[in-house]
Amino acid sequence: MKIVHVASELFPFIKTGGLADSVASQAKTLARFGHKVSVIIPGYRAVMEHPGFASARRVLELLVELGDRDVRGEVYALDLAAGETLYVVRRDEFFDRTYPYGVGTMDYDDNAARFIFFDKAVVEILRLLKLKADVVHCHDWQAGMVPVLLRAAEAQTGTTLALSTVLTIHNIAFQGVFPRREFALTNLPDEFFNVEGVEFYGQMNMLKAGLVFADRITTVSPNYAREIRTSTYGAGLDGVVRSRGGDLVGILNGIDTEIWNPETDPHLPARYSVEDLSGKAVCRRALLEHCGFAPEDKGPLMGMVCRLAHQKGIDLVLGSVDALAKLGIRLVILGNGDRDYEAALAEAREKYPENIYHDSSHDEALSHLIEAGADFFLMPSIFEPCGLNQMYSMRYGTVPVVSNVGGLVDTVTDIEEDPENGTGIVVRPDVRGVIRGYRRAVDLYANRELMARAIRNGMRRDFSWEKAARAYEALYREIV
Ligand code: ADP
Ligand code: GLC
């Protein structure tokens, strides 16, 4: 099949979160299965300057109608692997910026123009490069307008540009909602701006556009597929989700088991396997040293790597620092985002320098060292469509302490509930739950036998992408 992925992020070129990892592994695995896979992303500064992008060639110049402007763009192509090509839409006015979506928690005020332009450029690429896609697979709101723009362009030109479309929701909390006036940028007839279309409480909603017009909808875990049908997790779109009920399926993400492999990881000071964990102790010492923590074994060392956002339960961590310090737990946090959270974490570190370490950079290498060096990985998310870090941590023999939401439920088995097969600690997403998680971690850490079993069970789990990619393949076959 010819499959075209449309996304705003792709590892290693541009990444702010799991979307980049998910799309990259999915595309790579489908290409290995023998499909012809293209991935289209915006030409952010990080992409254009990425060393791996130096050999890309310019293949196309575009002219896109954006409201009452005609906007030029360029398209670059790069072969990523056999059967896998990356296309990058370049327009420096829109994408030559340090951050993809905005600074801190402030979105850029031209995001509607930026991503409507991108989605229209995708349709032009399909048309001009004659990609003859069997499936156009769109990810998240940034690609949400593609299905409707595609069908509008087909009606206008009388040609078929793609046989079918799929939308994957990686996070329903981000929807790309813009004032009504921005709808003019789509150049779609007014009749699309209604309840059955892209209108959402008087505004334009790009994710909703995808939900309504894509042939099929997927999300990144079975449990989240159930959750987003409810008002608690549906972020206002649960009604739309329910109305597409039969067309929605949850397919659990895998992880890239080549990049995330403790036996070969080049970021680690020592490598290890489930048969011989001695290298993990070396990583632990290196992590303690990195954080300026005392080198002696003083109880559980916990790690956390995430965007500093409400979703990730940062308030719960901040609300439980006293208990954490009292229990003698040490916590390393790598993450950035909300400036208020960054300030609050700096304050917590000042209060408990022997228990809390925070680094606000984006650091791929340190994220690997945390996964390897910590005893536990903390992920008390308020909601979590899938979550990748809990899977990385199990693969690295680091016991996850997670909340009972979304994909965390689908991937972590509580060791208390199932002492034979358990891989982690599952708690409720509130301060009491998190403190309970700390207490249980301290107890588990002291119970060498059970701790060793949790580690082994986690390391032996299969989180590879093959299964997920087969599920996508089956879905594509069904709709094509
Ligand atoms: P989300 O996509 O909601 O942010 P995921 O768990 O799916 O959550 O994926 C987050 C990804 O981003 C993980 O690969 C994680 O390691 C990475 N990540 C987040 N913050 C940082 C950071 N500061 N430095 C390095 N990697 C980070
Ligand atoms: C989103 C979700 C995260 C998921 C990732 C990849 O960013 O927040 O839970 O793992 O997408 O699908």
Image (tube, rainbow, N blue to C red):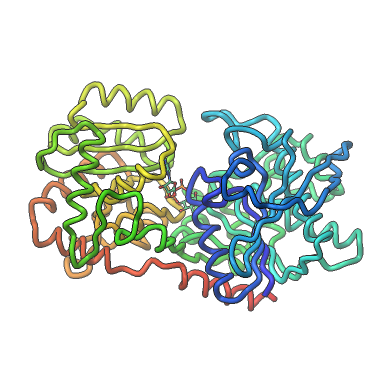
Q: Position of residue 467 (x, y in %)?
A: 46, 73
> Who's the residue at 42% across and 33% down the image?
361
**Is residue 437 something that shows in the picture?**
yes
Give the farthest residue toward the front: 55
Q: Position of residue 239 (x, y in %)?
A: 60, 54
> Who's the residue at 55% across and 65% down the image?
28
Q: Position of residue 348 (x, y in %)?
A: 27, 25
Q: Position of residue 217 (x, y in %)?
A: 61, 63
Between residue 14 and residue 301, name the one nearer to us.
Answer: 14
Vertically, is 136 above or below 189?
below
Quarter of the image with the C terminus is: bottom right
**Is residue 202 something that shows in the picture?**
no
Between residue 249 and residue 424, name the one nearer to us.
Answer: 424
Give the farthest residue toward the right: 157
Q: Is residue 326 left or right of residue 152?
A: left
Vertically, is 300 above or below 139?
above
